Image (cartoon, rainbow, N blue to C red):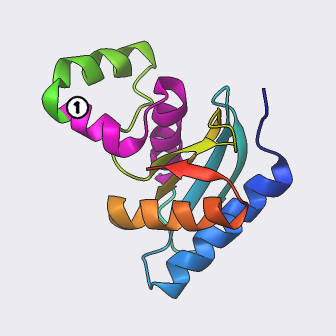
Amino acid sequence: MMTISLRRARTIIRKALEKGREMEFKPLSVVVLDAGGHVQAFEREDGAAPGRFAIAHGKAYGAVMLGMAGTAQMARAEQQAYFMAAVNGVYGGQVVPVPGGVLLRDKKGAVIGAVGVTGDTSDNDAVAAMAGIEAVGLTGEV
């Protein structure tokens, strides 16, 4: 199984933050997880709230552990709140089922990790994540 390298993870973060500044988003926090849900890299911009790590992590963690991007998780939560409540119980309350949790896929479509971005609206967070992912030649699933 391919995984996300530290070099690529750092580039994803740098490019996501650059996109946020370019689009005048609020200060962002970005985490990159490997396929096992472990933190590969994280950065929080100056001015971002200190609790943003947990939100960014929760967005990415839910995506990688469920194999379901944030947008799909949110739809599932709206349709079957009991399911997402159960999932959050299983994962110790770590899942944040909203856009901004983006699955990372390699060229063959295999999940190799996830990116979590928080700080602006969930949709803008996803835009920033995709900018970072595209910059390293991977595919993101929003």
In the rendered image, the residue lying farthest to the left is 79
In the drawing, does residue 137 fall left or right of residue 70?
right
Span colored in magenta? 51-77
Q: Nearer the viewer, residue 43 or 36?
A: 36
Circle 1: residue type: Ala
Residue 37 falls in image quadrant? top right
Q: Nearer the viewer, residue 61 or 114?
A: 114
Give the secondary structure at mark 1: helix
Which residue matches tag 1?
77
Determine whether 28 is above or below 96 in the image: below
- What's the magenta bit mostly, secondary-structure-wise? helix
In the drawing, does residue 128 fall left or right of residue 86?
right
User: Would you say residue 119 is visible in this rendering?
Assistant: no
Point 17% across, 23% down: residue: 80
Residue 46 image offset from top left, x and y in percent:
59, 74
The image quadrant where one finds the N terminus is top right
Determine whether 107 is above or below 44 in the image: above
Point 45% across, 30% down: residue: 94
Residue 108 image offset from top left, x and y in percent:
68, 37
Determine whether 84 is above or below 45 in the image: above
Point 36% across, 18% down: residue: 87
Question: Magenta includes 74?
Answer: yes
Question: Magenta includes 21?
Answer: no
User: Would you say residue 98 is visible in this rendering?
Assistant: yes
Residue 72 image offset from top left, x and y in percent:
33, 38
In the drawing, does residue 38 fall left or right of residue 95?
right
Determine whether 56 is above or below 27 in the image: above
Question: How many numbered tags mark residues here?
Answer: 1
